[in-house]
Structures are given as C-alpha cells and as structure tokens.
Image: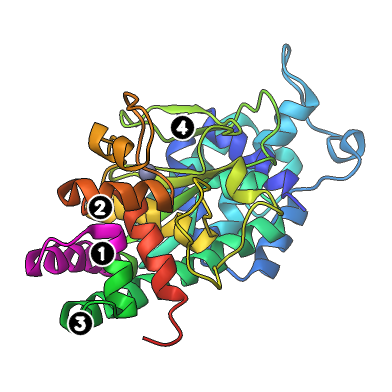
Amino acid sequence: MPKTYLAKALRTLSLRDDGKRLVEPIARKLSALPSSQVNTINKALDFGWLAWAMRGVRVPPGRTAEYIADLRRAAILCAKVYELQRPFSVSAEGWDERELRTVFEQAERVSRGAANPGYYLRGSFWGFSNHSEREWIRSAWFAAERLVRLGLRAVGIASVQVNGGASRTFFERYFGTGGGMQYERVRKVLRKIQKGMWHSSVGIAYQGMGVPANEQYRETSGSLGVPVALKQNLDEWGWSREGRCIGFGVSFFLPDQTVIERTTPHTVETLNMEVSRGGAVLHELSHYYAKTADEIVPAAAFHHLGRAPEGNVQAYSPKVCWALAQTNPDQAVNNADSYRSFCEDAGTLWVI
Ligand SMILES: [Zn+2]
C-alpha cells in the first residue's frame, strides 16, 4: 500500500519555503528505520474522521480543515522522525502555524549529518510507491552490487584468457578488442561504481505508476536543483542527475516487464532491451559514479547492424552495444548500457 498520510505530510513540507529543506533528510531518516516503524508513523498521521479530529481547531479564513490537518501531519512527521520533545508532543489540536514553524526550525537544526553509505529512498518513494516496489529497489540494489563484482571478476579472467574463453568472448562482445588498455579502462569504471556503492550515498527517486495525475509534491531532480512537481515518467526506465540522485520510471516497475536478475546471457539477436532491474540500477550508477554517457550510435555501428544510419540514437540494448564495440571501442568503454549488458552476462556465467 502507498503511504497516503506520509505522502500528505511530505507534500506539505515540499510546498513550503520553511519545510522543503526537510524533505530530503526526513526521507533519509525513514530509509534507516525498520518498515514497521515507518508504518507506525504513517498511521499516526491518519486522523480518522477529519471533522472529529479537527474539533477545537481554529481554521483561519480562506483555509480548509484539510489544509490545517496536512500542516499538523507535517509537524507530527518531523516530531516523530526526530523525536522532538515538548511542547510538540502535547495537544496536537492546539498547534497553529506559528508553532509549526518552530517545529520545522527545530527539526532543521537536528536534521544535519552525513548519510549512511549505500542508498536511501527519496520522499517520492516513501509517499507514492507500494511495498513491492520498495522491495524491488532493495533487491535490485544488491543484484547490481553483485553484478559489478562479477563483472570485475570477468574482466580479470578475460584479460588473461585465451581467445574463445567465455569471459573474453563477453568482454569483446561489449568492449571490442582494444588490447590490454581496454581491460584497464573497463575495470576502472566498474571500480568507481563499486567504490560509490560501498562508501558514498545516493538518493533514489520514484516516478512509477503510484504517482497520481497532477501530483503537487515537489522534488529536486533537475540539474539546477529546482524542485519540480513529481510526475509519472513514461519515457525512461531510469535516469541519473549528477551529484543529486538517480530515479526510475514506470517501465522499471511494471510487474511483467522484467526480472531482478537474468539467468541466461543476452543473445545479441534482437534489439530488445532485455534489461534486469539489477542491470538498470547498475546502468544509472555508472552514470552517477563513473560519469559514463549514453553514447550516440555512430554511422559505422548502424552499417554493422545492416541499417541505414540515423542521427541522435543512443546506444541502448545488448545488440546495439555489440555493434558499437565492434566499430568504435572507445565509445563502448564510455557507454552505460555496455556495462549493464556486460555485467548482466557476467552474472550468468556459471562456468568461466
Ligand atoms: Zn543512461
């Protein structure tokens, strides 16, 4: 179930000048709590029958009871997450906007501090995803970690393997035959992703089906750091905003669309994406931590595919990555989906 009341509280914070800076640290805090505790907080923000819950509350002219209720939810969320003490724990009905500001200020003072290494779910995830979707991200994160590890192992083996060895075949399929330097370049990118996953922290944003049409909740995702209204993302599986966060769109969350991990190697016969969720996380982290790009497919690669060249097509899918590697290995070692495809294959190598 989406956490409806948490969504209301986060939305309220995100729309206020004195509250928007709290959304990110609160989301980080929630990510470190057991899910039962997050459920308890969500329930505490459910006031039941609104008219009864709002008895005795003075609703200012031009405001609605729902508006005041959402302000109270935002304040209670701050108080719960940061365990703020009196006077905020008393008489929730009595809070007015002036007191709420004090809650926000107090929360902001205690909200500073470094994030734990790994990932955390951003406010959009807490407000709008369902339980399965949060579980998929968790499994996909660990799958990505494993795929990077197996990718590094396959590079190591490929670099000393004779022609025709499985690891070497997969390596050359996605990165070409650039000699010893090519192994080093790929290894460097994979190590950067691994180091980032182990020692840094990245927020993950949600743009799946759970986001209602015309949602008002605002989240920072653009490169300028301007908070924008959250929307479902029908165009991209995922995206990465440098130094800020990564996020996933509707396709990533469609239940029948994909798996957490692949069990068979890519065939390189179709133009299908054949993407796993672990692979999709790895793809975005390669942008985020190793500054890879979605390379533009060069004319030579189109010829290799037996197709007429097109402009501005990005190199996605194992088959396109294969054509890129055979025609322009320098681009292949900078292409995010080449790492995704290679590591997914490395993850299926039972016998090296
Ligand atoms: Zn990409």
Sequence-earlier tag: 1 or 4: 4
Q: Could you tell me which secondary element the residue under label 4 belongs to?
A: loop
Q: Could you tell me which secondary element the residue under label 1 belongs to?
A: helix
Q: Which residues are magenta?
A: 173-195
Camera-near label (2 vs 4) is 2
Residue linked to disc 4: 18
Q: Is residue 252 left or right of residue 116?
A: right
Magenta stretch, main secondary structure, is helix
Task: Identify the residue at the far top of this view.
Answer: 62
Residue 208 picture location, percent across and down: 63, 42
Contact? badges 2 and 3 (CB < 8 Å):
no
How much space separates mark 1 and mark 2, taking CA atoms? 7 Å
Disc 2 marks which amino acid? Ala
Measuring 77% from the left and 21% from the top, which residue is drawn there?
64
How much space separates mark 3 and mark 4, taking CA atoms? 62 Å
Task: Count all numbered tags in the image, as a single digit.
Answer: 4
Q: Nearer the viewer, residue 24 or 243?
A: 243
Disc 1 marks which amino acid? Glu
Residue linked to disc 1: 172
Q: Quadrant location of residue 229?
A: top right
User: Quick check: is 178 in the magenta stretch?
Assistant: yes
How much space separates mark 1 and mark 4, taking CA atoms? 54 Å
Q: Is residue 260 left or right of residue 114?
A: right
**Residue labelled 3 has its Cβ within 8 Å of some atom of ligand 1:** no
Residue linked to disc 3: 162
Sequence-earlier tag: 2 or 4: 4
Measuring 65% from the left and 35% from the top, which residue is drawn there?
71
Residue 340 picture location, percent across and down: 39, 58
Q: Nearer the viewer, residue 316 or 219?
A: 316
- The correct choice, above or below, for 319 with respect to 33 in the image is above
